[in-house]
Amino acid sequence: MISDEERLRLLATLVRKFPADDPRIDLGAQWEREGVVVSVSLGRDGMFVSLNGCSSRFETASELVAAIEDVFADRLVGVTAYADAHPIYSALSRPDDPSAGFGRLDGPSGFDMPQIDVVQIQSWSGALDEERAFDADSDDSL
């Protein structure tokens, strides 16, 4: 099996050996434990951190590193919102305010967000994992 260091050296060799007008290099890494996957993606389209597919974009390297640290410490969780059993939203969020991003998806800057039925929260440790009904009018729903 090829080591991580060997893969990085091989990638650098391939980029130098096969030049193109504008080679695109996207890099990623992932950590997996008991079915939970944390990944980071660095590319032209931005820098992303993901927890089981719930992904958020970060503007700076320091924000990215802080986000990864927060995911591993359960200070960021993956949030997926469902409407009629279909996922309509997913992102990373603080566990004390998992629905914080919902509002920006509704109205002129986003799309008309359907009525959310269920919200699923996932954490690296599993300690904060839950799935529950969502009531937008209730302060207790999340």
Image (spheres, rainbow, N blue to C red):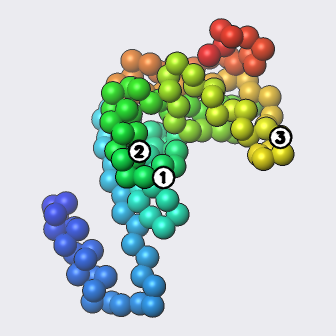
Locate residue 98: give its quadrant. top right
> Horizontal placement of 70 versus 95: left or right?
left
The residue positioned 80% from the left and 34% from the top of the image is 114
Residue 17 visible in the snapshot: yes
- The disc at residue 59 is 1
> What amino acid is found at the position of numbered circle 2 in the picture?
Glu
Residue 25's spot in the image, x, y percent?
A: 39, 72
Q: Which residue is mark 3?
A: 107
Residue 134's spot in the image, x, y percent?
A: 70, 19
Secondary element at image label 2: helix
Locate residue 19: give its quadrant. bottom left
10 Å crowding of disc 2: few (<14), some (14-19), many (20+)? few
**Contact, mark 2 vs mark 1 (Cβ under 8 Å):** yes
- The disc at residue 81 is none
The alpha-carbon separation of the residues under discs 3 and 2 comes to 28 Å
Which quadrant of the figure contains the C terminus?
top right
Residue 5's spot in the image, x, y percent?
A: 16, 63
Where 15 falls versus 78 (above or below)?
below
Q: From the image, state whether disc 1 or disc 3 is nearer to you.
A: 1
Q: Which residue is mark 2?
A: 63
